[in-house]
Image (cartoon, rainbow, N blue to C red):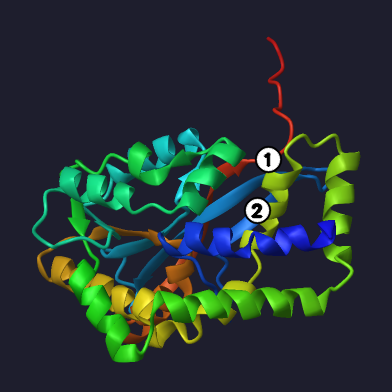
Amino acid sequence: MSHFQPRNCLAAIFLTLISAGSTFADTETQFVRVATDDNENPRALQMSIVSYVPANDDRILNVDLVSAIHIGDPSYYAELNERFRDYDVLLYELVAPQNAVASNRLEKRKGFLSGAQVGMTKLLDLSFQLDEINYDQANFVHADLSPSELRQSMDDRGESLYVYFWRIFFASLDEYAKDPLGLKDWEMLSAMLTSDQDDSLKTMIAYEMTNIDQVQDILGDDSGSAVIGARNQRAVDVLQREIDSGAKHIGIFYGVAHMPDLEDRLQDQLGLVYEKTGWLDAWHLGPEVEEDAD
């Protein structure tokens, strides 16, 4: 039945976000959203840049959580490349050997990209993060587990791709049970069609990516998982090392799914507090807006 098809996108969405990583938790901070225009039509899928400072009001240190999505508009990645130059240090995620050359790490990672990611990139006319981000910038610092460390962490927690497969399956059933007639999907689709939207599938997937329940059901407890918790702790350990080395303006470029747990770790382990949120358009949605001629 056609109304079940959006839920069938769950596995593809999970792979697209988790390989970079995306889950959500109960948090007041928003890390991803769909922005709308003045007529409430979807305009863009947006990723956040959330800033944190010491609780003692020492504004010398500033840490930004830069939410990533691993397929996006080239303009989104171009804007990130510009902003990354301003950081003393930019910590990035990539499951790769710690001593590998950056270019070699990227080529190996591309070799493991799933068919779902490749298909979604072509289907939605988007680009890969690994093709667009300049990882050769001098201030980039690897802040992730190696493949062997991730495998060991998953083994220690009883996690596996097999476990995730069944979690995806049952999460899909749960989503279907909540709305068996697909009314939510039809309402969104109807609104997009009546607004002359020509990229309805892209917009529907964008809304699915902001669902705060479905992906969390797949990963379970973020803080205790290897995919989220163990990798986030490595990022915080590297962050503390860079702070101790004198860095003052630091960015952490990780998949949006990692951000709620990372925020908790910044607050609990480093005593940082929320300061502000900025937004970047990651996917353009809807018709192009023409600028007025002079």
Tell me which numbered mark, 1 or 2, is placed earlier along the sequence.
Answer: 2
Quarter of the rendering occupied by the N terminus: bottom right
Q: Which mark is residue 183?
A: none
Instruction: Give the class, few, some or many, for how many residues have Cα within 10 Å of label 1's Cα (few <14, many ≥20).
Output: many
Check the image and report above or below for 21 versus 38: below
Q: Residue 121 placed where, x, y %?
A: 52, 42
Number of marks in the rendered image: 2
Image point (42%, 81%), residue name: 264
Image point (48%, 45%), residue name: 118
Proximity of marks 1 and 2: CB atoms separated by less than 8 Å: yes
Q: Residue 20 placed where, x, y %?
A: 40, 59
Q: Looking at the image, which is closer to me, 271 or 186?
A: 186
Look at mark 2 in the image and give the residue it sits on: 206
Q: Secondary structure at mark 1?
A: loop
Q: Secondary structure at mark 2?
A: helix
Look at mark 1 in the image and give the residue it sits on: 285
* Three-letter amino acid code at the position of disc 1: Leu
Q: Residue 133 placed where, x, y %?
A: 33, 41
Seen in the image, is 19 located left or right of residue 4?
left
| Quarter location, residue 131 | top left
| Quarter location, residue 244 | bottom left
* Three-letter amino acid code at the position of disc 2: Ala
Seen in the image, is 71 located left or right of residue 139?
right
Image point (87%, 48%), residue name: 191
